[in-house]
Image: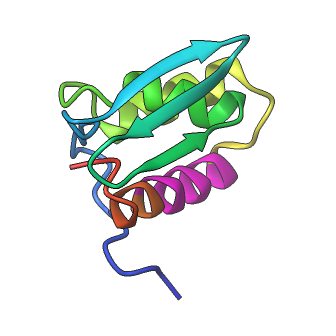
Amino acid sequence: MRPEGMPTDLEQAPARNPNSAFRIYEGQALIVLPERGENHLLNPIGSHIWDRLDGRRSLQEILDSIVAEFDVPADQARADLLEFVANLRLKGMVI
């Protein structure tokens, strides 16, 4: 079952919450959401995705970059990307 808010269209271009702040250290992104009083630490693939959520790159472009850069099958990367972005939306990290 797909989480609520899970994107299905790889042509959409989600963006990071403009009120978030982040830094990437040694391949891991630390995201701060001041309005929610939350911090989130992402693994290297999550950080790769986060860095590309600029509102201009489509999910398909991000998916292509994941497959090119990491040792992961395209079908698995697609499913994981869609679920990850849906979870970021639920946490208010992506608009």
* Above or below, comparing residue 25 to residue 71 in the picture: above
Q: State yes or no: residue 81 in magenta.
A: yes
Q: Nearer the viewer, residue 77 or 85?
A: 85
Query: In the depicted view, which residue is nearer to us: 71 or 43?
Result: 43
Query: How far across and how far down the image is residue 79, in percent?
Result: 57, 59
- Residue at position x 56%, y 44% from top? 40
For residue 53, what is the image quadrant? top left
Which residue is rendered at x = 61% and y = 55% of the image?
80
Task: State whether the magenta stretch is mostly helix, strand or loop.
Answer: helix
Q: How far across and how far down the image is residue 48, in percent? A: 56, 25
Q: Residue furthest right?
A: 71
In the visual, does 50 lie left or right of 35?
A: right
Residue 32, percent across and down?
Answer: 43, 36
The range drawn in magenta is 75-85
Direction from residue 34 to residue 82 in the image, left or right: right
Residue 63 placement (x, y as % from top left): 49, 36
Q: Residue furthest bottom?
A: 1
Instruction: Name the residue rendered at 73%, 11% in the picture.
Output: 26
Query: Viewer-proximal residue, 54 or 63?
Result: 54
Determine which quarter of the picture holds residue 25: top right
Q: Which residue, as the protein is rendered here, is positioned at the far top? A: 26
Residue depicted at x 52% and y 62% = 83
Q: Nearer the viewer, residue 54 or 70?
A: 54
